[in-house]
Amino acid sequence: MFFWKKAKGERSKAKGLDRLSTSLEINVKWLKSNLFADDDTIVYRHFRTKEPQARQCVLIHADNMTKHEFLSDYIVRPMMSSSLPKELQGRRLIQHITEQVIQSDGVAVFTDYNKLAEGVVAGSGAVLVEGCNHGISVDAQGWERRSVTEPQTESVVRGPRQGFTEDLLVNVSLVRRKILNPALKVKILDVGLQTRTKVAIVYVEGIASKELVDEVFQRIERIETDAILESGYIEEFIRDSPNCPFPTIGHTERPDGVAGKILEGRVAVLVDGTPFALTMPYLLVEAFQANEDYYHHWIAASFHRTLRYISFFLTTSTPGLYLALVTHHPQLIPVNLSVSIAAARKNVPFPAIVEVMVMGLVFEILREGGVRLPKPVGQAISIVGAIVLGDAAVSASLVSAPMIIVVGITGVAGFVVSKLNDTAVLIRILLVVTSAILGIYGFLFGIMGIMIQLASMESFGVPYLSSLTSLTIQGSKDTIVRLPWWRMVLRPRHLAAKNRERLQRKSRSKTK
Amino acid sequence: MINESVPERQGAALVFLFIIGNSFVFGLARWAGRDLWLSFLVAIVLALPLILVYGRLDTLMHGQSFSEGLHRLFGKWPSRLVALIYSFYAWRLGCLVTGNITNFVQAVSLPDTPQVVMASAYAILVLWAVKEGIEVLARFSSVMVIFVLLILLTALALATTEVDLQEFFPILYDGFWPVFQGAFQLLDFPFLETVLLVGLANALTTKKNSAYKVLIPGFLLAAFFLMLVASASVAILGEEMYKITFFPVFLAIARIDIALFLTRLEVVVGVTFAIGGFLKISVCLLVASKNLAHALGFPDYRFLVTPLVLSIIPGSQWFAKSVMEMNLGATKIAAFTDVMVQIVLPMIFWGVAEIRMSRVRKNKAGKPSGI
C-alpha cells in the first residue's frame, strides 16, 4: 500500500517528530497536543507497577472502541501486580512485558507515534512505560455489533438464515465456516486515504485462476480515494463497462451465496462496514439465479428460473410491445381483443405513447416514494397510488383500462428479477421509444442493440453472456434451467479453466 | 486477461444465421416448383465440395485474415485488386440485403414509413456491431439462433394443419432441368455467399483445423432448414401460388389459424428476417471494410466502417429499387460476377495455396507454416 506509506511519511515530516521519547511525560504531552489534540474520546489511564521497582505506565485507548473488561483484566491488573526487574531497559523490558505480563494473543511493539495512533483509532490499547522508548499495542477491539440475522433483501424460504453484518472479521468467519479448507484464502488490504477501510479479498486457491485474483488485487490497489464507506464505492471503481446499467459485479448479503460463488472460481470482496459482499466476475445469468435454486428440487428450481426470464421479458417489453401493436400493427391483435382495446381507448384524449410514458413515470414515482418511507406510510402510498389513482384515471378517461393492466404487469414482473430492476426501467424506456418509431421492428432493433451491447461486454475478462452462448448442455447447465447436482460435472469454463472437475466420477449418476 | 476465442459452435451459429439471413422469405428454387426439395438436395451436394475448399483455404491461412492470405499468395498489387473485387462484392451484397429488408417491411407491415428510415436504423445498428468485431457478432448469433430456430420451428409445427403432401406429386413431372435450374439458383444465393466467411472463420476457431467444424455444420443446418421451410411453403400454398408470390413463406405462415386465437403469426417471419438480415449485413460490411482497407493499403480497417456503412443507405435504394426487381434479382440463376467470386477465384486461390504449401513443406520439413 505504497500510497499510504507516502501519506504517512508526509504527515510525520510535517510534525517534525515521530519516534517515541523515553520520557513518559513528554510522550503523553506530545500525543495530547498533536496527534490526539481536540479529541475527547481518547482515554489515558495512568498506573504504576508493583513496588519495589515501581514504574509509571499509561494505557491509551479510544473509548467505546475497546472492551473495557479486557483492558482491565488482562493488561492493567497483571501489570499492576507484577514487578519489573530493574536491570531490564528499553527493548528487553518491553519483551519481558509482552512475554510474561500481558495476557493477550494480539500484541505488537512499536517505536513511533504514528503506529501508536493508528492502533488506538482502530481499537487497540497502547501501553507506554516510563524510561522506555518502545510501546506495546494490544488488540482489544470491542464495539457494538449487529448480530447475525437473516438479510432483509435476500430472504429465503429454505436455506441458511445467516446474513453478513457490518463487521469484516465476522463476515470472513461466516464464509470460512462454510468452507473448512486451508485453500480458502483471505487477503486484507486497507483502502481509502482517510477512512483506511479494511477490504478482504476472498478466494479458493486452486479453483480461482491466478490471473483473476491478481487482476482484482491490482484494480483495488489502484483505488486512491478519500473514503470507502460501502462496497458500492469499490464496485464503481473496479467494474468493467462502467457506463452500462447492467451490473458487471455482483453483490450479496448471504455467506452461502459468497461460498457458492467462490467455489465456482470467482473472487469475493468483503468490505468493512457493510453487509454487502462483492463477487466477480459477474455474468448476466447470475442476475436470474437465487441461492434458493440450489436447495430446491431441480425441476422446481428450473421452473422458477424460467419464470424469472419470462418476468424480465415482460417487465422490459410489455409497454413497448403494447405500443407497437396498438399504434403500428393493430391487425396482429386477434379481432375481439382489438375491438375491446379500441373501445377502451376511444375516449382517451392522448396518443398511446403519452399514455405509456405518463403511466410508467407515475409507477416509478410511486415505487421510489414507497421504498424509503416508513412501512405504514409506504402502504398508504401504494394503496393511494394503485387503487385510487389508477381507478380514478380510468373513470376520468385520462388513460385506458388496458394501459393500467400493462403498467401493472410491468411493475409486478419487475420485482421478480430484483437484481436487474434499475436496468429494466431503462430498457423499458428504450424499447417504448424505439417501438413508437418503427413498431415491432423498432422493438426488435432495441432488443438487437441490447444484445450487441451485452455480447460486447466482459466482466474481469469473462464474456458477459458466456453461459448463454455456449450452446452445449454442460455449458448451459446452470442458466435458464438448473440441472440436478449430479449432472453438473464441470465448473464454468471461463471461471475455473484449469481445474474444472467438481464432481467425482462415482457421483456422476444418481446415488440411490 | 483471459484470452477469449470463439468456440466452434458460436461460429457455426453465425454461419447458420448468415445463410438463413435474408434468403428464407423469398421463393427459393422456384424454377423447380414442387420438386424444389430435390433442388435443395442437389445444391447441397454441389455446394459441399466448395464449402470444403473454403474451409481448406481457412485452414491454410490460419491466423491470417483473408487479405493477408491474398497478399502472401499473389504479392502486393494483384492481391489488392482481388481484395477490391471482394470488397465490392461484399458491399453490394450488404446493400442488397438491406434493400430486401426495407422493401419487405414496407410491403408487408409499415407501408407509410419511408424505406430510408428503416435503412438508417439498420445502418446505426450495423455500424455499432461491425465496430465491435466478429467475436461479438458470433456471441450475438449464438443467442439469437436459439430464438430464430424456436420461432420458426414453432410456426412450422403450427402450420402442419395446412400442409397438403399431395402438392409434391407427381415427382419430376417436368424432368430434371428445372431441378438443376433451381439448384444453381440456390448455389448462387444463398449457399455460396458463404465465401465471404473465408478468413473470418479462422477468427472464430481456436484450433488449427477447425474451420470445417464452423462452416460445415452451420451450412448443413442452414441448408436443411431452408429446405424444410421452402417445402412446407409449397405444401401449404401449392406450386402455382409459391411461384407467383413475392414472399411465399410469409403467406404460408399467415394461413395458420388455430382456434381463432393463434392467427397472424406472419409477424414472426418478419422478426426472424430482421435478425438474420442484420447479421448478414454486418458480416458483409465487416468483410467489405477489411478488404477495402487492404486494397487501399491501410493497416487498420475501422475508420472505413463508418463511410461504408452509411453508404448502404443510398446503396440499398439503388440495388433494390422495388419488390419486383429485388425478387427477380434474388431468384435469378448464377450471374457472371457471382460465379467468379464464389467459385472461380476461390478455386484459383486454393490451387495456388496448395502448390505454395507443398513447396514450403519441401523447403522446411516439419516446420508448421501458413501460406
Image (cartoon, coloured by chain):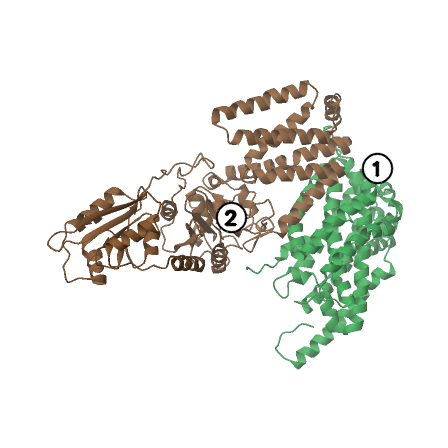
Q: Which label is found at residue B278?
A: none
Q: In this rendering, would A433 be left or right of A77?
A: right
Instruction: State if disc 1 and disc 2 touch (CB < 8 Å).
Output: no
Can see residue B142? Answer: yes
How packed mark 1 is, by other alpha carbons closer than 10 Å (few <14, some 14-19, many 20 or more), is few
Displayed quadrant of residue A18:
bottom left
Residue where numbered disc 2 is placed: A235
Amino acid identity at mark 2? Glu
> Which corner quadrant holds the N terminus of chain A?
bottom left
Residue where numbered disc 1 is placed: B112
Q: Residue B248 versus residue B1: which sits nearer the camera?
A: B1
Displayed quadrant of residue A94:
bottom left
How packed mark 2 is, by other alpha carbons closer than 10 Å (few <14, some 14-19, many 20 or more), is many
Can see residue B25? Answer: no
Please state the horizontal and vertical placement of residue A166, each as a whole percent of the image.
40, 42
Display colour for chain A? brown
